[in-house]
Amino acid sequence: MDAGPLLRIENLVKHFHVRLGAFGERLATVHALDDVNFDIIEGETLSLVGESGCGKSTTGFTLLNLHRATSGKVIYQGRDIAGLDDRAMRPYRRQLQIVFQDPYSTLNPRMTVGEAIAEPILFHALATKRDVREKAAALLGDVGLPPRFAARYPHELSGGQRQRVAIARALACQPKFIVCDEAISALDVSVQAQIINLLIDLQAKYGLTYLFIAHDLAVVRHISDRVGVMYLGRLAELAPREQLFEAPLHPYTKALLSAVPEADPAHERQRRRQVLRGDVPSPLSPPSGCRFHTRCPLAMEVCRTVVPEWRAARPGHHVACHAVTDGTA
């Protein structure tokens, strides 16, 4: 894994304006992302975890400029791509790809598998029409499907096979960076393991960098180099995988990890869970100060009014929490 960052995210903000009420008479703002900062190192897998609605997928979409950032920077290879229009983004689309959660909705039902894979190759002029069929067959082989699948339509495939096609289509552009947005959550458990191992193999073969968005912490621990924990549009903690799983600092991370069942029944019975009180606040009106203070067992008065600083509590281990001092909480 290389030492330098492939992507640098600085003070990233994404707000959505929505209309509320029976007749849309009230205008409101959804605070999807607020002041998010992190780097993605070339060749690594950085995972984002957190409850539904915390901003994980919005982060991935905004990095790729599928959602236009409200403010902040997404610096890719030295250039801020956050504000680029569609024409200026075109050279970067080839290098920055995404694999969505539902492969069926991302594939054109009127296109064969071969045509779906060939489309981005021809669009970016990566092969001639004469050679594109051979290239599509090679990509199918890379994702574990035989060449005859090129003549099939998406409805003729299983969920796992469709996701393999979606991965092949992302690879067709010869990307450097891929966002995997819940790419395995719609699949059976046995198929999930196959897709995870496929992603790991492809990363080694092509030198890919992943942003892996998921709910399953066991999968995240298996595939990740580093893990970021999000809560209500902000990063709560970011650390190397084993450091985060073995010695988390943020109270929310501890509660999240305590919900993961242990394989050993005896240890599971003796384990003390950290159950959070209350519900996640609405992103329409997030709490002032630390957004977690309404559910935090360590909340202090300062947490209600002051946004915690995003800082390095340990080497390579960042956290945003007033209760964390000298690398402990």
Image: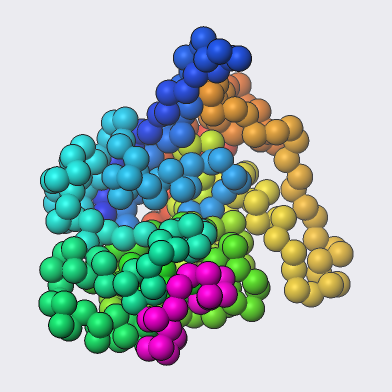
Name the foreground residue: 104 vs 75.
104
Q: Residue furthest top?
A: 25
Q: Is residue 325 above or below residue 204?
A: above
Tell me, yes or no, if residue 249 can be seen here.
Answer: no
Q: Residue furthest front?
A: 110
Position of 72 compared to 279: left or right?
left
Q: Residue at x 38, y 67 (%)?
A: 111
Q: Residue at x 32, y 85 (%)?
A: 137
Q: Residue at x 31, y 60 (%)?
A: 97
Quadrant in the picture for residue 68: top left
Colour scheme in the image?
Answer: rainbow
Residue 116, given in percent of the width and then of the height, sits at 34, 69
Position of 82 compared to 249: left or right?
left
State the extent of the magenta-drawn residues as a range. Answer: 142-161
- Name the magenta segment's main secondary structure: helix
Residue 19, given in percent of the width and then of the height, sits at 49, 19
Residue 28, given in percent of the width and then of the height, sits at 48, 18
Q: Residue at x 33, y 45 (%)?
A: 66
Residue 297, given in percent of the width and then of the height, sits at 70, 36
Locate the C terminus and report the quarter of the image it occupies. top right
Name the foreground residue: 134 vs 67.
134
Q: Is residue 288 above or below residue 329?
A: above
How many numbered tags mark residues here?
A: 0
Locate the N terminus and report the quarter of the image it occupies. bottom left
Position of 308 compared to 76: left or right?
right
Name the foreground residue: 75 vs 273.
75
**Does residue 143 belong to the magenta stretch?**
yes
**Does residue 196 belong to the magenta stretch?**
no
Tell me, yes or no, if residue 27 can be seen here.
Answer: yes
